[in-house]
Image: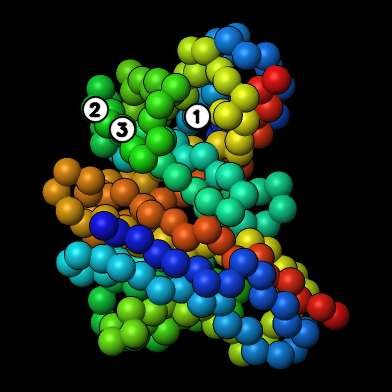
Amino acid sequence: EAQVTQNPRYLITVTGKKLTVTCSQNMNHEYMSWYRQDPGLGLRQIYYSMNVEVTDKGDVPEGYKVSRKEKRNFPLILESPSPNQTSLYFCASSADNGVGVTQYFGPGTRLLVL
Amino acid sequence: AQSVAQPEDQVNVAEGNPLTVKCTYSVSGNPYLFWYVQYPNRGLQFLLKYITGDNLVKGSYGFEAEFNKSQTSFHLKKPSALVSDSALYFCAVRDERGSTLGRLYFGRGTQLTVWP
């Protein structure tokens, strides 16, 4: 089954404790991205990657890091989480950047930073 | 800047009645527009998209959307709502500019509630 998976689905942590949210897709997609969803703000892009070893900042990259060492994986790293990073996070992927290409979303990771 | 606006935070409609979820956009260049739906505790699911061609686009689950260039709108519609359509709906526009090619910009979302 074609899908985007994220782990963990739920995470409670404390300020300053480094964490990683994994994202993996099995569709051989080149383009991957991370979004955060906050009430009243919709989805905002954090980082995206056009291909292996190619990443760039989205609208709200502060406090986050990413890496793209393999095509299928795009982990999101919070080196020193803060309470304002409490949010719902989505990973997405698409085949490429062509016109009209549809992005597929993972199930989401709900993060609470105390 | 590329952006979309969803003017209604909530839409309530009775089952069997037609529904409309509104979206307006602002883009430089050609508009590539999408609708996604989010059911509780689920990720976003693609509903439909407008790239070019017919202004009326048909998508999943009986939804359709009408692209109106003069009004810069892309409203989502369904002739007869179902209780199971209750969800959070997002409109998005795709960026076609060079350095930010492929990025999606989302509206704030509209919560649709269909009453039995």
Quadrant housing residue A70: top left
Instruction: Tell me the kind of residue under disc 1.
Output: Cys
Is B37 situated left or right of B56 in this image?
right
Q: Earlier in the sequence, mark 1 or mark 3?
A: 1
Q: Which mark is residue A36?
A: none
Question: Could you tell me which chain the residue with mark 2 belongs to?
Answer: A
Percent of width and height locating residue B38: 62, 57
Count of numbered labels shown in the rendering: 3
Q: Residues within 10 Å of mark 2 (few under 14, many from 20)?
A: few
Q: Residues within 10 Å of mark 1 (few under 14, many from 20)?
A: many
* Mark whose residue sits in front, 1 or 3: 3
Colour scheme employed for the rendering of this structure: rainbow
Residue at x 52% of width, y 13% of height: A80
Q: Secondary structure at mark 1?
A: strand
Discs 3 and 2 share one subunit: yes
Residue at x 52% of width, y 58% of height: B108
Discs 1 and 3 share one subunit: yes
Q: Residues within 10 Å of mark 3 (few under 14, many from 20)?
A: some
Residue A12 drawn above or below residue A47: above
Percent of width and height locating residue A31: 32, 40
Residue A36 drawn above or below residue B10: above
Mark 3 = which residue? A57
Mark 2 = which residue? A54
Instruction: Tell me the kind of residue under disc 3.
Output: Lys
Residue at x 23% of width, y 46% of height: B100
Mark 1 = which residue? A23
Discs 2 and 1 share one subunit: yes
